[in-house]
Image (cartoon, grey):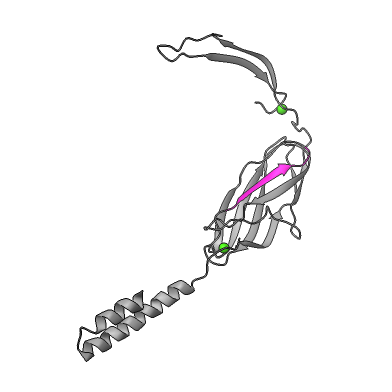
Amino acid sequence: MTKNICVSSMGFFPARIQRASLIKCLLLAAVFMCDTAHSADVTAPQLLEWDFTPKTVDVTTQAQRVTVTFRVTDDISGTETPNVVADSIDTTQSTGFANVQLISCNAIDGVWQAQLTIPAQSAPGQWKINLFPLRDVMGNSGNFGPGAGFPSELSVVSGTADVTAPQLLEWDFVPKTVDVTKQAQLVTVTFRVTDDMSGT
Ligand SMILES: [Ca+2]
Ligand SMILES: [Ca+2]
C-alpha cells in the first residue's frame, strides 16, 4: 500500500521532487517491511535459575522467612510478575502469595526475589514452594514451576503445630421467612466457631 501511494503521487511532480518522493517512498517501504518483519511473541518465559534459603525453618516459637531468588527470560514481550507460594504437603496450610520483586535487569532477562513467611505453629514436615504462572505480557503461559532440576521442598520444624481446622459449634439465622414484595429484607446469621490454637 505504501508503494502504491508513492508511485501514484510521483507523476504529478518535477524530477527533483520525484527524487525526494522516491527516497521518501523507499524509507517508508523500509519501515513497512521492518514492521511486518517483527516476530509474534508466542513463547512462554523460561526459568533459568532458581534457589531458596534457608532449606529448613523452625517455627515452634516464631514465624520464619524464606527468600526465593530466580531468573526468568522471555523472548519478546517480557515476563509478568509471577506468583510464589509455599504449601504444606500433608495439610491444607499455605503461606499465601509472597511479595515478589524484580531485583535486577528487566522483564526480558530478570532476577526476581520472593519473600515467604512461614507462620509460627505451622504444620511440620515438607512444604512445597510453587512458582506460577510463568506468563509473559502477551499471555503466553508455561507450566507450574519451578519444575524438575530445581529445589522446591522446604523442611518445617514445628514443636507446637496447629494442624486442626476450626469447628462450627452453633449456627442459626432469623427470620426464616422474608417478604420482599415491597422492599428488601435483612437476614441475620449468628454462629459460634472454636479453634484449638491459632484462632479462626
Ligand atoms: Ca514471550
Ligand atoms: Ca486450629
Q: Position of residue 123 (x, y in %)?
A: 75, 37
Q: Position of residue 189 (x, y in %)?
A: 57, 15
Q: Is residue 133 above or below residue 47?
A: above
SS majority, magenta: strand
- Picture residue at 68% right of the left edge, 40% below the top: 94
Quadrant of the image containing the C terminus: top right
| Magenta-colored span | 82-90
| Quarter that holds the N terminus | bottom left
- The image shows a total of numbered marks equal to 0
Ligand 2 quarter of the rendering:
top right
Residue drawn where x is 64% and y is 14% of the image: 171
Of residues 39 and 154, the one nearer the viewer is 39
Where 5 sits versus 163, above or below? below
Q: Position of residue 14 (x, y in %)?
A: 19, 89
Q: Is residue 47 above or below residue 164?
A: below
Residue 73 within the magenta-colored segment of the rendering:
no
Residue at coordinates 55% horizontally, 63% vertically from top-left?
104
Residue 84 magenta-drawn? yes
